[in-house]
Image (spheres, rainbow, N blue to C red):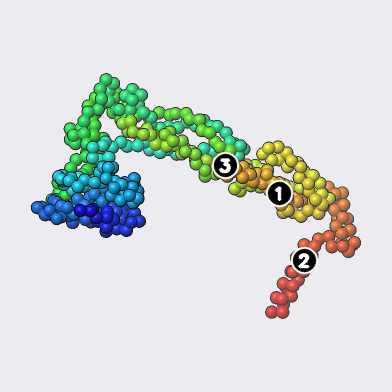
Amino acid sequence: MSKRDYYETLGIAKNASGAEIKQAYRKLAMKYHPDRNPDDKSAEESFKEAKEAYETLSNSQKRAAYDRFGHAGVSGMGGGANPGGAGFSGFGDVFGDIFGDIFGAGRGGRGGHTQQRGSDLGYNLTLDLEDAIHGTTVKIDVPTWVSCETCDGSGAKEGTSPTNCETCDGTGQIHMQQGFFTLQQTCPECHGRGKTIKNPCPKCHGQGRVQERKTLSVKIPAGVDNGDRIRLSGEGEAGLFGAPAGDLYVQINVRSHPIFIREDNDLLCEVPISLATAILGGELNIPTLTGKVKLKIPAETQTGKMFRLRGKGVKSARDSITGDLLCRVTIETPINLSREQKELLEKFDQSLVEDGKKHSPRAKSWFDNVKQFFSSKERN
């Protein structure tokens, strides 16, 4: 007799998500489980079908093989096909994957010992703008937990080793019977590890790790910016009892610069120029991150004029695109003038009025708009 389609068995579509597969199986398992249907061969067969379908479709590799080749694609992969699989130890045996997140029993809960991965750490690193743009290597001092060298992370005294937990018999889990449910919980004695330490290491007191400060060299790539993070894999806190270490995330902060402001890949700077330079024009030496460049100021330049120096900005750490340097000129009003200098300016200003030419087009336009504004007010 040919087997039913696994998707049809669970009553789901072929594009069903993992959560939908789990939900469908849970519903059928609750309905047909032998503990709830004693001496009902039909319910037992339905339960076996649902279990077989779930074990295949919940595994990405098996599901891919089944989608491509049908039942023949998973017949030799194990787990999915078990037509004669008799014997059910209770709901805890069946629902370990489904209820694991509720009762503390993950996929490693049955037969596998849990290990607590070390925590991730964060470190705030402040850089000068030049170092952030050009890249550098920085040494940082990090307080953290590291694996105990005396016991090699086991937590047991030298010459001894952890033993199987007597409470859970080394499984890391205990089972509690509640009616027809068998609930699986993390063992309170060994906390899911499956091992206990009768003779703890004197240096780490049985934790398998000690607290130290370590110095790390962090390579800062060129072009990093405020808010960027650099991940140092395995440089976080050591895990308990030899579990993997966490990661260290270095958060980049860039100090304010006295000349430049960074906006994405561009640099902005404000360049003050004298009144004479603005009127007559001239050349200025402009600083960049790679040296000085000449900036030509044309005659009759107005304040706020923006000059773009292409390719003099920042080379991005992500896409290798180099930005520009944007120079905004501001005309600086001279101060601390002598009487003679003031008189010369007054004569200069008078000469502009007397020759009848339009030397201040923006001012004339502004005053014309002001007159029109007040005229409209008077009419209203």
Instruction: Give the residue number, with chain letter if any, for mark 3.
Output: 317
Which amino acid type corresponds to the residue marked 3 in the rendered image? Ala
User: Do labels 3 and 2 touch, CB within 8 Å?
Assistant: no
Helix, strand or loop for disc 2:
helix
Which residue: 81% across, 54% down? 300
Instruction: Give the residue number, with chain letter if any, for mark 2.
Output: 365
User: Where is 310 relative to 150, above or below?
Assistant: below
Lower position in the chain sequence, tag 3 or tag 2? 3
User: Where is 154 relative to 374, above or below?
Assistant: above
**Of tags 1 and 2, which is closer to the observer?**
1
Which residue in the rendered view is the most extreme toward the top? Answer: 159
307 horizontally vs 132: left or right: right
- 340 or 256: which is nearer to us? 256
Residue 9 drawn at (x, y percent): 25, 56
Which amino acid type corresponds to the residue marked 1 in the rendered image? Arg
User: Where is 307 relative to 379, above or below?
Assistant: above
Residue 188 drawn at (x, y percent): 22, 38
Which residue: 40% across, 28% down? 212
The quadrant of the image that shows the C terminus is bottom right
Helix, strand or loop for disc 1:
strand
